[in-house]
Amino acid sequence: MRTQTILLLLLIALAKLAVVIFVHVWSVDVGMGGLSPIILGGDDGITYRRIAGHVAETGRLPGAPNVWPLAIGLLMHWMGLRGLFLFKAFLFVASVLVLVYGLRLLDRLSWEATRQRPSVRSQAVTLVLLGLFPTVVYYGSFSIYRDLMIYASYLACAYYGYEVFVRRARGGIGLVISLGGLFAFRWYAAVAFVAGTVAWLGVVGLRQSRRKGAILASGAALGLLMLALLVRMNFFADFMHYLRFRQTFEAMEGGSTLGIDFASATTPWGFLALYAYSFVSNAVGPLPFQVNSLSTLVGFVFEVPVIAYALYRVFRGQVRKTPGGRYLLLLALAWFGLIAIYNDNLGTALRLRVLGMQLVFLVFACELWVAQLRRRSLTARRQARPAALVAQVV
């Protein structure tokens, strides 16, 4: 890693740490005890603090919406710690891991596309987009949301998946560990990762590998594993529950719902139209007419233009046609496709879409590097042409 990149990584990490400390002091000063000092919707941290406090005091594991408060509560119990600092320490480490895994993925993608290491500029773009994206900053410093743990786990899965399936190198143990962690933090993110990987194995892996039997076996093993987990969780029996979830929990908590009711679709075309609207809103929203809160306004002004430009460059570029580029984009597409069914809340969409947009941003950063190399090549040819003409005349 180049010196300039290391310095920028450290600078962004220190900036994020400064924000965490500032927000924590602000929160304590206004009487929130380390949770979000401003309310832009429901604060999951209130529930997490209560559960973790119970585990820290008793050592017993009550029912919980996910593993995050249970794990931190157990650590508090064993270490004799209290308060929210352990939550925030893990979130800060996760925010740094996002940057590290992002750079490593960019390096792999760049080598595949250009046979060169990425430029400092493309690395800087990666660090800024992954580290300073407004939603990432908010959920990594305000309160004790688990999102940074999920972002880091998803990028780790993408990296080790890239190593195992695209490069056919070592990384199986890392993939199993990171996928297990992702499933523990947000099970349907693990489902999306497996779905995207299986899709890549079928669309790209089989066509470009001589080991078709191994590819089929890998895809079947991943698919059967996830199918077994979903059956174990009664996912298919309760599928209508997940559709009704859009009109119940999200409506009560966020106040900025899309109002999409899939159950009301009477024809397949009607369902597809509703799904397409939900997909676009979750992936690149909020749309102008959907802005109805401070969080959606921030997303529309500061995030939507960046996302739109990144998607435009990725669609027009060549990196998306490489096996690695297709792998990352299929992982992102699988995630967007899933949350288009699951999520109806615009505020929640801002935090959920980061998992997919991280991968899009990596392809975008690599595309900037490829375009830079292309401009260099054109410039060199233009400069060489007059010299060649002079030589012919002489």
Image: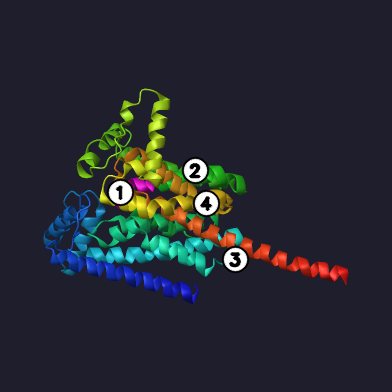
**Viewer-nearest residue: 285 or 187:** 285
User: What element does badge 1 sit on?
Assistant: helix
Of badges 2 and 4, the one in the foreground is 4
Is any part of residue 297 visible from this angle? yes
Q: Residue at x 49, y 43 (%)?
A: 199
Q: Tell me how far mark 2 sits from mark 3, CA to CA.
A: 28 Å
Amino acid on which the number 3 mark rests in the picture: Gln
Is any part of residue 180 visible from this angle? no
Residue 8: give x, y in percent of width and height: 42, 72
Q: Which residue is identified by label 1?
A: 296
**Which numbered disc flags the more N-terminal residue, 2 or 1?**
2
Of badges 3 and 4, the one in the foreground is 4
The answer to whether mark 4 and mark 1 are in CB contact below 8 A is no
The answer to whether mark 2 and mark 3 are in CB contact below 8 A is no
From the viewer's perspective, tell me whether residue 139 is left or right of residue 201: left
Residue 347: give x, y in percent of width and height: 29, 47
Please identify the quarter of the rendering in which residue 181 is found: bottom left
Q: Which residue is identified by label 4?
A: 314
User: What element does badge 4 sit on?
Assistant: helix
Q: Tell me how far mark 2 sits from mark 1, CA to CA.
A: 32 Å
Q: Residue at x 44, y 48 (%)?
A: 332
**Viewer-nearest residue: 387 or 109:** 387
| Start-end of magenta stretch | 183-191
Amino acid on which the number 2 mark rests in the picture: Ala
Which class describes the residues within 10 Å of circle 1: few (<14), some (14-19), or many (20+)? Answer: many
Q: Which residue is identified by label 2?
A: 199
